[in-house]
Amino acid sequence: MIKKERATKETKISISLDDEKSPNDSSISTGVGFFDHMLTLFSFHSGLYLNVEADGDLEVDDHHTVEDVGIILGQMIRELYVEKSSYQRYGTTYIPMDESLARVVLDLSGRPHLSFQAHFSKEKVGTFDTELVMEFFNAVSMNSRMTLHIDLLKGGNTHHEIEAIFKGFARSLKAALAPSDAGVPSSKGVIE
């Protein structure tokens, strides 16, 4: 199990991540209801146990909480794949959610990059600002040092659009972390 904490003047966050414990036991409480829902879906579809406790300056808005959770989660994903002696490295997933369709492609390469091509149907889902989805994935990709391409190919319902992206990310990460018999997944013999 990997545990990390982050405390700033804006947020206080504690996260535990485990690839051996059941995601059904996950507990997520950020104070941002829609974001909790997305993280719960991420945990279930990635197969990763996730315990998140966040106390942020939600009276300002949700930005700091969402971004800081992404920073910590990214650091933990990096630690998870660096600790492995071998893994698939790449993950590609298409996820339909009714009328919406998302494609998520990632590479646990040690080279951080985010390409985010998603134009949401609405600016908010309830009180959640949809622009925070990109902020979250930018924080995850930079801090995990992964290359991450997210494309919303079809949309209609904003909740469905975002849900398809989170599920696609989870499934792609699960595929990339899967064991491999080939050793370190790089012809260089190392991923830094």
Image (tube, grey):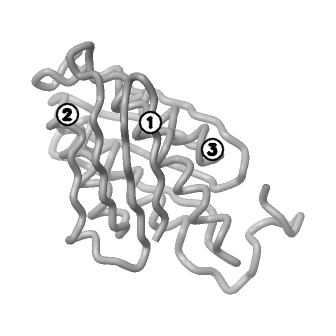
The residue at 18%/35% (across/down) is 31
Question: Which label belongs to residue 147?
Answer: 3
Between circles 1 and 3, the one closer to the viewer is 1
How packed mark 1 is, by other alpha carbons closer than 10 Å (few <14, some 14-19, many 20 or more), is few
Tell me the amino acid under the disc marked 3. Answer: Thr
The residue at 27%/35% (across/down) is 55
Q: Position of residue 111 (x, y in %)?
A: 72, 44
Q: Earlier in the sequence, mark 1 or mark 3?
A: 1
- As helix, strand or loop, the secondary structure at mark 2 comes to loop
Q: Earlier in the sequence, mark 2 or mark 1?
A: 1
Tell me the amino acid under the disc marked 2. Answer: Val
Q: Earlier in the sequence, mark 3 or mark 2?
A: 2
- Mark 1 and mark 3: span between their CA atoms? 27 Å
- Mark 3 and mark 2: span between their CA atoms? 27 Å
In the image, residue 32 above or below residue 177: above
- As helix, strand or loop, the secondary structure at mark 1 comes to strand
In the image, residue 13 above or below residue 1: above
Which residue is the site of mark 2? 32
In the image, residue 123 above or below residue 137: above
Tell me the amino acid under the disc marked 1. Answer: Ala
Asked if disc 1 and disc 3 are in contact, CB closer than 8 Å, the reply is no
Q: Position of residue 81 (x, y in %)?
A: 61, 65
Q: Is 72 left or right of 185, judged from the image as shown?
A: left
Residue sticking out furthest to the bottom: 181
Question: Which label belongs to residue 7?
Answer: 1
How packed mark 2 is, by other alpha carbons closer than 10 Å (few <14, some 14-19, many 20 or more), is some
Between circles 3 and 2, the one closer to the viewer is 2
For the C terminus, give its image quadrant.
bottom right
The residue at 41%/63% (across/down) is 17
- Camera-nearest residue between 50 and 163: 50
